[in-house]
Amino acid sequence: MKGSNAKVVREKLEQATQLMKKHEIDTWLVLTREGSDPALPLLVGVRSVHQAAIFIRESGKHIVLTSKSDAGSYESTNLFDEVRVYESSMEKAFTELWNELSVEKLALNISEQDHLCDGLTYGLYSWLKDNVGEQILHEREISSEEMLGELRSIKTEAEIATVAEAVRITVEIFESVHSKLKPFMTEIEIGNLFVEEMKERGVSSGLGDAYDPPLVCAVRHGLAHRKPSDRLVEPGDIVIIDFSMKYEDYVSDIARTFYFLKDGEQEAPATVNHAFETAYKAITESIEALLVDKKGYEVDAVGRKVIEEAGYPTIRHSVGHQIGRATHDGGTTLGPRRVPVRLAVEGSLKAGEIYAIEPTVIQDKGLPCMLVEENVLVTEEGPVLLSKRQDTLWLVKR
């Protein structure tokens, strides 16, 4: 493991031990096989092929029990005080190690709410119960959800720098593509421009496969989470492009809206400009509300109010969500309160979290829609914009 990735993992493992001290947990156990736990890259930066048991310790003296073939991957991280290898029977080696460690409070990656915190499979949990004993496990186990959620959400210095670079490259790609757009391209052709830009820079898509195109929607053809179509983009069309890009395992999530000018037009029609101005104002006020200790639903209400007061239908999704190793990175969400209660929107914002802000004007029947999405870091001193804002509707001339 080299470079910024190694620095990120070291910072995250140190952050994990501090969270364990805060929650008075002596051992955090990650059981995995074939990379089954989504927390594994975040915590140790290794994908096990065979079954492994990773013991993260409050003391900072971490131990992994792994197969002989996987041992080298763990040793190369220099994160572990001991890399213990099992040969034919992991069960025997695990029991010996468990008894040596005298575990009193055991955190496991189990969650009913957050899939990113629910990495312990039922099969591996059953294996653990068989090897530790059901009663002992019941007395000592605790969900790691609160710790893991905070670990994912609160970015370290190296993580923030990596996300910021992903955002910078994404903005650069958008600007390059803007210069190449012209009427009568298909949505697919526009999407392929982004693929070419990613390949040129050695980066990949943040959603789906490595070279999947972004969401490209001519509003006239319907606004939805769909793949680009072979339908033409014509003069008079509003085109929304929502692009998540991955750089060194961290992602951006930025959207831009374009208007394709008709013959004789120097600017978009008033109804289109009004939709943009409304979305822009909603984004501005939502960003200003990104303050430490604000509740997720409180920030959502700010952006949602702007959209509704301008006479548009309410937003069909949340005003914002966290980004990091995933485009939708779990933790606190900037969404509306509903029944039953959604824990994600009841969460409080913390310094070090990064949000994609996207209060959207959405209308049916081809009426003007507007999606502009910016990426923002929460700090103790206030919000810090990571992306270069789209201040005006981007025009495409014939």
Image: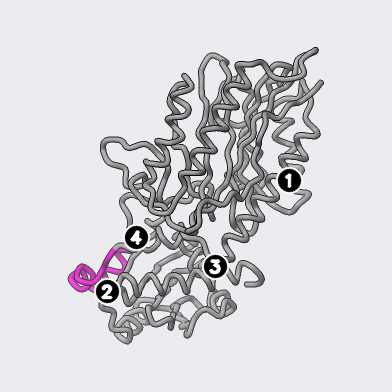
Query: Which residue carries the number 3 mark?
Result: 45
Q: What stretch is highlighted in magenta?
A: 120-142
Residue 146, numbered circle: 4
Residue 172, numbered circle: 1
In depth, the one of 204 and 236 nearer the eye is 236
Query: Which residue carries the number 2 mark?
Result: 105
Mark 4 to mark 2 CA distance (whole Å): 15 Å
Where in the figure is residue 115, as x and y percent of width and height? 40, 51
Disc nearer the start of the sequence (3/4) = 3
- Mark 1 surroundings within 10 Å by alpha-carbon count, few (fewer than 14), some (14 through 19), many (20 or more): some
Residue in the picture at 73% in, 43% down:
173
Asked if the residue under mark 3 is in contact with the one under mark 1, i.e. CB atoms within 8 Å, the reply is: no
Disc nearer the start of the sequence (2/1) = 2
Residue in the picture at 46% in, 34% down:
303
For numbered disc 4, what is the local secondary structure? helix
Where in the figure is residue 2, as x and y percent of width and height? 65, 72
In depth, the one of 116 and 161 nearer the eye is 161
Asked if the residue under mark 3 is in contact with the one under mark 2, i.e. CB atoms within 8 Å, the reply is: no
Disc nearer the start of the sequence (1/4) = 4
For numbered disc 2, what is the local secondary structure? loop
